[in-house]
């Protein structure tokens, strides 16, 4: 039987049910700003990490393929982090606006700002526009190719909230949107999209299928009642087998990406270090599989959040490879 996760009391405290207890939004942010920050998921930073990490992968691997970091790369690292925070916030605001009726019917999401009445739909749309405009200021500091890719990503962001209504694979649409930064930041780094960038993007998409299927297992019962589709519902008890396949696919594509980028370097050490990072990533995902209990929402949420550490392993080893 599915266990009920132990959440705070959102109706009384005004917090979002699945936000980490004692997060900075609920404790130190000004009271007037809290509903908007909650709408942007600022109280749950894991989404920003998962959007930023493919950007870090791309900057580090592109730099390693060219012999090392430059000051321009440092700007790309910092600016992509700020952009990830802003665009994740804008995307979540749009997602909550389109899903406000569904969210009101799901125990985990009914405490979000829109279904709980902390903000109005109009206020949400204005807030979304503000965040997107600030992100655009950063985007326009990049190459023309990167700017074009950034504009194109808006179509993916717009479509994603509706995917769960017409396909059992909405996680694919999330992966397309969340890993777009791998293409955008490679283009911002050297103005091209080589095969290594495409392989890196594909690896991120398969990784998203892995972690977001785990995440979706929190809501399978409610999703079935309201007619929302997901890979978690599609795979059901076979999810561990599918996740094992996604693990192998993500690792294989990462190996392909670093090989494309680093095989022709004068020294073999950058490639070796990068491959060690991919191995560490795969081992972390394997550990998640061993601990997974799809009937326990708390377990699923904890493992989902741990993917920040999985992605950081790749980013740190790729950064180390640039020094060799």
Image (cartoon, helix red, strand yellow):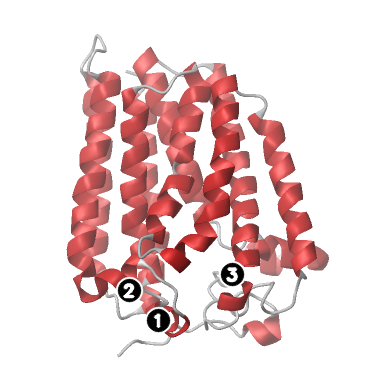
Q: Which residue is mark 1?
A: 224
Q: Judge whether 56 appears above or below 14 on screen.
A: above
Which quadrant holds residue 267? top left
As drawn, is 272 to the left or to the right of 156? left
Residue picked out by circle 2: 233
Name the foreground residue: 77 vs 132: 132
Q: Residue furthest top?
A: 266
Asked if disc 2 and disc 1 are in contact, CB closer than 8 Å, the reply is yes
Instruction: Decide which of 57, 22 is in the foreground and name it.
Output: 57
119 shown above or below 264: below
Please tell me how crowded label 3 is: few (under 14), some (14-19), or many (20+) other residues with Cα within 10 Å: some
Crowd class of label 2 (few under 14; some 14 to 19; many from 20; radius 10 Å): many
Q: Secondary structure at mark 3?
A: loop
* Pointer 2 or 3: first along the chain: 3
Answer with mark 2 or mark 1, whichever residue precedes in sequence.
Answer: 1
Q: Which residue is mark 3?
A: 99
Mark 1: secondary structure: helix
Q: From the viewer's perspective, is 160 left or right of 245?
A: right
Give the camera-side residue of 321 and 185. 185
């Amino acid at each position: 039987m599915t266990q009920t996760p132990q959440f705070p009391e959102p109706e009384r405290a005004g917090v979002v049910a699945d936000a980490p207890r004692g997060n900075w939004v609920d404790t130190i942010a000004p009271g007037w700003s809290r509903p908007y920050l909650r709408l942007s998921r600022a109280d749950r930073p894991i989404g920003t990490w998962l959007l930023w990490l493919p950007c870090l992968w791309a900057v580090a691997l592109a730099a390693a393929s060219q012999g090392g970091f430059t000051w321009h790369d440092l700007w790309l690292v910092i600016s992509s982090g700020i952009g990830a925070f802003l665009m994740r916030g804008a995307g979540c605001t749009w997602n909550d606006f389109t899903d406000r009726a569904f969210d009101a019917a799901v125990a985990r999401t009914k405490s979000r700002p829109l279904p709980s009445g902390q903000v109005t739909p109009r206020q949400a749309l204005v807030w979304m526009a503000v965040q997107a405009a600030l992100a655009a200021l950063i985007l326009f500091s990049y190459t023309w190719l990167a700017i074009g890719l950034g504009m194109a990503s808006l179509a993916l962001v717009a479509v994603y909230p509706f995917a769960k209504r017409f396909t059992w694979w909405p996680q694919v649409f999330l992966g397309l949107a969340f890993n777009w930064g791998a293409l955008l930041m490679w283009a911002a780094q050297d103005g091209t999209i080589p095969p290594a960038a495409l392989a890196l993007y594909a690896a991120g998409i398969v990784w998203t299928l892995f972690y977001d299927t785990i995440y979706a297992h929190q809501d399978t019962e409610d999703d079935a009642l309201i007619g929302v589709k997901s890979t978690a519902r599609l795979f059901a008890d076979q999810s561990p087998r599918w996740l094992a396949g996604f693990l192998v696919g993500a690792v294989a594509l990462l190996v392909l990406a670093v090989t494309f980028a680093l095989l022709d370097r004068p020294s073999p050490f950058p490639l070796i270090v990068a491959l060690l990072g991919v191995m560490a990533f795969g081992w972390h995902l394997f550990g998640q599989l061993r601990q997974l209990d799809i009937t326990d929402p708390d377990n699923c949420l904890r493992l989902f959040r741990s993917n920040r550490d999985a992605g950081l392993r790749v980013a740190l080893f790729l950064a180390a490879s640039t020094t060799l």
